[in-house]
Amino acid sequence: MFRRASKSKKDAAITDSVASEESTVAKANTSDSLATVSPAELKKELALKEIALSGMKKQLKDEKSAKRKLFSSLAKVAGELKKQQNVNEPIIDAVKYANRSWYEGGMWRPPAVLPGVANQQIQLIVREDLSHLFFSLVMVTAFTRVGLAVVETGELSLEALLYFAVFWMIWAKDINYSTRFDTTDLYFESINLLTCVAVLCGSLSASSSLASEDSTRIMMMAAFVAALHIILHCRVAIWFRNSQSGSVENLAKKHAIFSTIMTLCETTTWVIGVILPELTERRLVIFSLGICFSLARLPKNFLVCDFRVASTRRAILFTLYLGFLLQSVLVAASPFFSYQSPTIKEYGFIGACGVMLYCIKIFYSDDAPKHAQDHALLVNSISGFLFSIFHFFLLLSLTVFGSGLDLLTHSYFAATAALPRSAKQMVCGGFGAVIFSIFLIKSMHMKRIPVGKQKYFFVGVFCIQSFVTLALVAVSGLLCFDKPYFGALLQDEWTLVLGLAIVSFFLVILSWLDEMVELALYESEDDSRKALVHPFGLWWCFSADILPDVSEDSEDSYSPLLGSERSAGISKRDKEKEYNTMKGQV
């Protein structure tokens, strides 16, 4: 073993000596080669190496720049994807809500805020619930019961006005809740059923005086419906009592508490009216206080409503009411056709009534705002309040107009010698009031005009529409009086109805002038949306709750008031100056 170790040491020593000799030889060869290379060649070789090194550095720098650009692009793509995801999430939630079954989450599930309340920019077709459609039919029935009272007296009495206001306030309570919260659970369905029964029973007493037992029944109905809505809002306030401050649920809780307090005051007022003796003066005060407490919920309090649902419910109620009026015309004319067939002129009378009511429907539904922030319900509290008040006067005017049309139809087919003065006044005055109310409702919305010289086309069209509409309203009002220069229209019922039908058709054509100008100036809707960015309206004394976004950093910035607009080189100072000067425009 000792011999093997000594042998391995000798081999290692021999290997080291050989390696040292080879290293010595290599150094000698290197020194010989350096000695043989000239300084010029050495300098040239060093220059080539420097060039290669600089090329490698440049290539490395380019690779780093490319990686940096790639990383920046990936970061932008990730940001856009995140932004798009945030935009699509409310739309997906709204689609899921619209397509879900009514019992999903439980038949007696807790209250929930509508998706359109949190995000007003969601543009979806509102699916009208059949329960709300039935409720609208019940309300239209109650309105027509008031109209029958107007037909009996031949005028709009104080009692009919107050009873109509009570029925409309019941409908407004339903809108106040159903445009903010889910209404497909059995809690709301049960309360909606009880409300419909109460309204139907109360409508039977809509033709009595204030100092009567029927008036007491009207107040009992109003107190019962108000108590039902107290239960609804208390349920919302209790469920969202622990909501986070600043969230939609917290705003829903505040809205429910406020509505509960005002509805409780209204209920107390009706109960006191039921207890007090049947005196006309006291009943007038009770009805006035109850209506005032109910009106306090109309403005935009704490939580905005889903304006698309609210607009759909108003349009359905208005259309159903027009259908009921057309039915009343046919019912009034039907007894006269039992013994003889109608003549061509009588067919023309019924057709003129249908054309007139249909044109009123088109005139009402025209000029809907394209942007959510342009709707009167979302501009500010005052515009939302006036929008609701004008809608009340629209339905009241339609009631007077329908009552007069009923009397006019009966007078025409009964071949009365002279046109009844009450029928003439109610038809002409009611028609003018309907047109004027629709004009006021449309004027509460914001309109859009271009920034350049093209804005004068739209401003001119809006001025023409306003002037002609107000002139026709004035003429309708003058027709209520016996003026000699309007005698041709008041010769008989057929001439009057035909004249009003022609005026209604003319108003529809007039309301389309701004759309005609828009189609003539812009090729597509996208072009018009990019150009029509400047707000314009008749009610600029009511400033918007949210100042328009005038930031110039983004190319296509969205603003809560101005919507999507192109900066087009307009500076921030010019935009602010333009917005401040527009507050005083009319």
Image (spheres, helix red, strand yellow):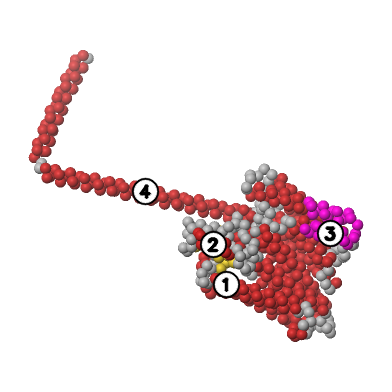
The crowding category of the residue bearing disc 4, from other C-alpha atoms within 10 Å (few below 14, some 14 to 19, many at least 20), is: few
Single out the mark in the foreground, 4 or 3: 3
**Quadrant containing the N terminus in the rendered view:** top left
Cα–Cα gap, marks 2 and 3:
49 Å
Tell me which label, 4 or 3, sits earlier in the chain: 4
From where the camera sits, is residue 49 visible?
yes
Q: Secondary structure at mark 1?
A: helix
In the image, which disc is placed on residue 285?
A: 3
From where the camera sits, is residue 308 visible?
no
Tell me which label, 2 or 4, sits earlier in the chain: 4
Residue interval drawn in magenta: 264-292
Is residue 249 toward the left or the right of residue 159 in the image? left
Question: What secondary structure prevails in the magenta region?
Answer: helix
In the image, which disc is placed on residue 458?
A: 1
Residue ID for mark 2: 577
The residue that appears at 51% across and 60% down in the rendered structure is 573
Q: Secondary structure at mark 2?
A: helix
The crowding category of the residue bearing disc 2, from other C-alpha atoms within 10 Å (few below 14, some 14 to 19, many at least 20), is: few
Residue furthest to the top? 2
Tell me which label, 3 or 1, sits earlier in the chain: 3
The residue that appears at 79% across and 64% down in the rendered structure is 164
| Location of residue 31 (image quadrant) | top left
Tell me which label, 2 or 3, sits earlier in the chain: 3
Callout 2 touching callout 4 (CB < 8 Å): no
**Which amino acid, by three-letter code, is at mark 4?**
Lys
Cα–Cα gap, marks 2 and 4:
45 Å
Cα–Cα gap, marks 3 and 1:
47 Å
